[in-house]
Amino acid sequence: MSSTDEPSLYAKREPVFPRKVKGKFRTLKWWIMAVTLGIYYLTPWIRWDRGPALPDQAVLIDMANRRFFFFWIEIWPHEFYFIAGLLIMAGLGLFLFTSALGRVWCGYTCPQTVWTDLFVLTERWIEGDRNARVRLWKQKWDGKKIRLRLQKYIVWALIGLATGGAWIFYFADAPTLLQNLVTGQAHPIAYTTMGILTFTTVFMGGIAREQVCIYACPWPRIQAAMMDEDTITIGYREWRGEPRGKGKARDGLGDCIDCNACVNVCPMGIDIRDGQQLACITCGLCIDACDDMMEKVGKPRGLIDYFTLRDEEVERAGGTAKHIYRHIFRPRTMLYTALWAAVGLVLVVALFIRSEIDLTVRPERNPLFDQMSDGSVRNTYELRIRNMTGDDRPFRITVSGDPMLFLQIEGTPYETVEVGADEMLIQRVYVTAPAGSEASEDARTDFRIWVEDLESNERTYEDTHFNGLESR
C-alpha cells in the first residue's frame, strides 16, 4: 500500500450548526448567559468610594501598586493566601458539582459555553436557523454569502472588542481608561490586550467552538474520576427508545422516532443516543428537543433526561428510581461540601482578624554589629511598615524582651514615624545594648520589635534577635 493510500488518523471537522430549540433548559441557559455576561461587562463600572488617592471602583486589580480591591475588601501582595484559598474553593466546588451533577459547569456557566452561545445566537439572527446555515455553508461564494458572512464577522468582532475592553477595565479606573482609549491616549499595552482578547474571543467562541471543549480543555478527561454511578448526568433511556424507527405503525418499535432532533440542537454535534461521550457538556438542549417531539407524537417525556446510571439499571428492571436528593446528598458530595465550607470559613475568619498593619523586619548582616566608642553594641535593622488603612497614620516603634535594649529611629530623635494611606514605609532603625550588658556580650539575644498605630491603638510585632560580641 502506498503512503497516499494510508488512512488518516485525523477526521475532517464537520461544522456544527445547532437548531433553535425551546424548553426549560434552553430558558435556563439564556438566563445564565444574561446574568454572567452582565456581571462581566458591568462590574468595572460599579463605583465605590475609596478616598482621594484611589479610583472609586468597586472591583479593581491595581497592578501598579500590587493590590486587589473587591468592594470593601483590599488584598495586598503578602496576603496572596486569600487568592490561593479562593482557587482551592473553586477547585473543590468544581469537584462537588461534577460529582453530583456531571459537567453542569461546562454546560451552563463555563465562559467558553457562554460566549459560544452568544456567537451562535448572533449567527442565527443574521444567517437563519440550522437549515439556512447549512445551505449557506454548502453554497458557492456569491454576493449574498459574502454580505451575510461580513455582517456576522463584524458583529462577532464587536462582541470580541467589548469582551477585551471589559477585561482591561478591571485593571484601571474604567471611565478614565475609556476616555483615554477613545482619544488615543491609553497605554499601548491596553490596545494590545484588547486586540489579543478580541481575536481569541472570536476564534474560540465563534470559529473553534466545540473544538475547544473537545481538544483544548483538560476537564473532559478529568471528569471521569469525579463521576460515578450516582452522578446525575444526561442519558438516553435505551430500554424505552429502542428499537427506534419512523412511521405511525409502532408495533415492535420503541418510543424513539429517529427524528434526530436531539442531534440537530446539540452544540457539540454528538448523538446522545450513542451513550456517554467525552464531548457531551450536559447542557440539556437535547432533553428540550426530545420532550417536544415526544409531546407531538403522544409519548411520555423523559426519553432523554437527567438521571444516573444506577437509576437506569433500576428502571430497566421495572423498578422505581431514587429521589434526586438521595443522589446529591451522599458521602462523597458531602465530603466535598465540608472541605469547601472549611476552606471558606478559614478565609472569612482570616479576613476579619487580619491586622491593618503589616511589619517586616530584616536585620543587617554586614556587619553583624557595630561596637561604639563607649563600648556599647549596636545592631541595624530595616523595617517595612505597611499602612493598610485609608488614612495617613502615625506609628510608634518600640522594643521588648530585654530591658537593656533601646531603639533609635534613623533620621529623627522621636520614636514615631508617619506612614501614608495605603503605603509602605522602609525605615532603618538602630537597637543598642549598653557596654557590659548581657545582650552586648552574648552571641544572640532574642527580642521583639513592636509597631503601634497611635490612632487606633492596633499593634503588631515581629520577633528577631540581637547580635552581641560573641557572635564574631
Image (spheres, rainbow, N blue to C red):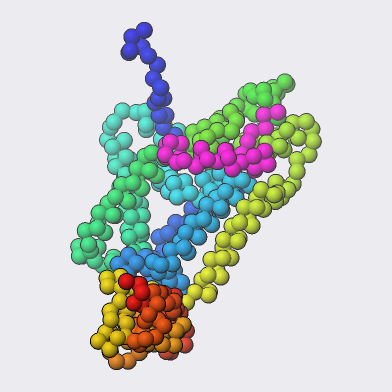
- The residue shown at (46%, 36%) is 214
Out of 243 and 75, give the one closest to the viewer.
75
Q: Position of residue 221 (x, y in %)?
A: 51, 37
Out of 221 and 104, give the one closest to the viewer.
221
Q: Is residue 399 visible?
A: yes
Picture layout, residue 143 above or below residue 244: below
Q: Give the quadrant of the C terminus.
A: bottom left
Q: Quadrant of residue 12?
A: top left
- The residue shown at (61%, 41%) is 227
> Would residue 341 be counted in the magenta stretch?
no
Q: Give the quadrant of the N terminus.
A: top left
- Residue placed furthest toward the right: 319
Out of 73 and 249, give the one closest to the viewer.
73
Q: Is residue 451 visible?
A: no
Q: Quadrant of residue 378?
A: bottom left
Picture layout, residue 462 above or below residue 155: below
Picture layout, residue 228 above or below residue 336: above
